[in-house]
Image (cartoon, rainbow, N blue to C red):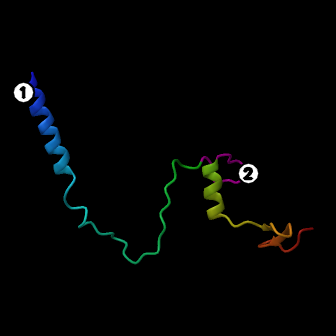
Amino acid sequence: MTNIRIVFISLMAALFFSACGGELDKVESKKVGDNTVVIHELGDPDYLNPVTSGSAGATYVQTNIFQSLIEIDFKSLEFIKLILYSLE
């Protein structure tokens, strides 16, 4: 029984250490020079409609793909018009 255990542990150690080496240094990106940022999200957004979505992931995606009509200046607490022509 102990011989089988020693052989099994030796085999697993050999497999573990042989899997750690190799060709990771040789892998090159196919998009060299492409100015692309890849952001990982845990899941797909539930909806892309800003009115009907409710999750934080969907809100994060919406702020990156839709432009806001106004912003707030937090120092003076006034509205800054981005797309909107008048606030009336």
Question: Mark on residue 65?
Answer: none
Magenta region's main secondary structure? loop
Q: Residue furthest right?
A: 88
Characterize the local packing of mark 2: few (<14), some (14-19) or many (20 or more) Cα atoms within 10 angstroms.
few
The image shows residue 31, relative to residue 46, as above or below, that is below
Examine the structure image and report whether residue 54 is included in the region drawn in magenta. Answer: yes
Q: Horizontal and vertical percent for residue 61?
A: 60, 57
Under circle 2, the secondary element is: loop
Q: Which image quadrant is residue 8 in?
A: top left
In terms of depth relative to the viewer, which is nearer, 63 or 76? 76
Disc 1 target residue: 3
Q: Is residue 13 above or below residue 24?
A: above
Q: Closer to the N terminus: mark 2 or mark 1?
A: 1
Left-right relation of 30 to 67: left
At 22% from the left and 53% from the top, the residue drawn is: 20
Task: Identify residue type, mark 2.
Answer: Val
Residue 51's label in the rendered image is 2
Contact? badges 2 and 1 (CB < 8 Å): no
